[in-house]
Image (cartoon, rainbow, N blue to C red):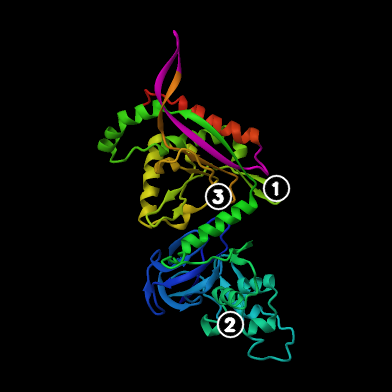
Amino acid sequence: MATFEMVMPRMGESIMEGTILKWLKEEGDFIEQDESVLEVATDKVDTEVPATHSGILKKILIQEGEIAKVGKAIALIENEHANGVEINNEPETIFTESNKIFEKKEQNQQIEENPGKKSKDSERFYSPLVKNIAKEEGISKEELHQINGSGKEGRVTKKDILAYIKSSQKLEDQHTYSGSQVFHKSVPILTNQGDEIIEMDRMRKMIASRMLESKEISAHVSSFVEADVSNIVFWRNQHKDKIKEREGESLTFTPIFIEAVAQAIREYPMINVSVDGNHIIKRKNINIGMAVALQNGNLIVPVIKNADQLSLFGLTKKVNELAQKARNNQLNADDLADGTYTVSNIGSFGNILGTPIIVQPQVAILALGTIVKKPSVIETSTGDAIGIRHKMYLSHSYDHRVVDGALGGMFVKRVADLLESFDPDRVI
C-alpha cells in the first residue's frame, strides 16, 4: 500500500500561497486522478485543484479557511495498488514525493525560547504569514497569545490577526496585506440619510490592493498616439459574417490589435521586461494579457500565451475562448499566469482616451480607445483632400524606472503604424 502527499500546486507567477475555500471531498472518499478535490483562492483567481493520484482521501492536512504554501502537503491519498513511494508515518517527518527529501512537520519547526518550561501558549502554532504580520505590526509573542483563533484547534488565521489589529486601533492608517504591506491614508467618511454602504467583494478588494500597489511600485508615465484604422474597419466589415458562418467565431477588433502589439514587442523587446530590485528581467515569451470586464463590474486579465506565434485566426479563437471563460467564471490559474504585457480595450465602453495602471510585475500597458469617424486630410497623387476616416487613440502607460519616453513613445507609435498599414486584401 502506498500513501502519497497531495501538495499545493503552483498557481501562477509570484503566488506562494493560497487559501483553502472548500473541500469537495471528505476523508474516506474515493477520488480519481485529475478529479477536482478542493477549491483554492489566491490573490488572482479562485480555482479547483485536481487530485494528483487516485485512491482514498486518507487525511486532510489543511482545513477550510487556512492558508496553504505552494509545494506543501495539503492531503494524504492512499492507494493499495499504486506503484508509488509510501509516506514515512513517523511523527517527526513527512516524505515528500515531489522532491524526495524528508521535511519536519510544520508544527515541529517551532523553536521554543524556553524549552524546559512549556505551556499551552508556548506550544501554540502560528503560520509564517501570521508571524510575519505580527512582526511587521510590532505585536509581541505575549500579545499574540491573547488573540482568539478561529482556525483548527484554535489557530490564529490571517483574518483573526487583521481583525485584532483593526479592533485594537493599532494602525491609524487603513491596512491592506498582500504579501508585502501597502499603506494608504484613511479619510474619515460621513454618511448621510439614504446613503447605501456596500461591502467590497473579495475580488474588488484584491483589485484595489493591486492598483495601489502598482502605483507605489512603478513610476507611471503615459504617451498618446492617434491611428487611422480605416482599413481594419473596412476589412472586418467585409469578413466578419463570413468568419462567423464558416468558423463559428466572432471576429472582433481585439485580435487584430493584439497581433500588432505582439509584432511591436518583437521589434522593441525591452518593453517586455520586469524589474527585480536592480535587475531587469528580459522576457523570452510574449504573453499578452487582455483586460475583460465582468458582469459584476470587476475586472480580470486572462493571458494569451506566445501571442506572437499565433495566426490572426488563432488569436481570434483564443480571444473568444478566454473572454467566454472569464464571463462564465471558468478561468483557471494558468489562464491568468505569466503575462508580460497587457492590452485594455477601453473603446468598448465608448472611451477615447485612458491612463491605465500597469499590471505588476509588467512594465507597460496599452489602452485602446473607441473608433470614431473624423474628417481628415488625405494625401493623394493629385494633392491633399478632406475625407472621412476611422480614427482611434492609443494610450500607453509605462514604468519610467526602466522605460524612457523614447522607448515608450516609439513603441506605441510602432503599434499605430502597424495598424495603419493593415493589408485590406488580407485573407483569413
Depth check, mark 1 against mark 3: the one in front is 3
Answer whether labels 1 and 2 touch (C-beta < 8 Å).
Answer: no
Mark linked to residue 90: 2
Q: Nearer the viewer, residue 70 or 132?
A: 132
* Residue type pointed to by label 3: Val
Q: Which residue is mark 1?
A: 279
* Residue type pointed to by label 2: Glu
Give the residue at the far top of this rendering: 382
Residue 144 drawn at (x, y percent): 65, 81
The residue at 58%/56% (across/down) is 212
Q: Quadrant of residue 39?
A: bottom left
Quadrant the N terminus occupies: bottom left
What residue span does the magenta drawing correspond to?
378-404
* Residue type pointed to by label 1: His
The residue at 58%/76% (across/down) is 94
Decide if residue 80 is in sight here: no
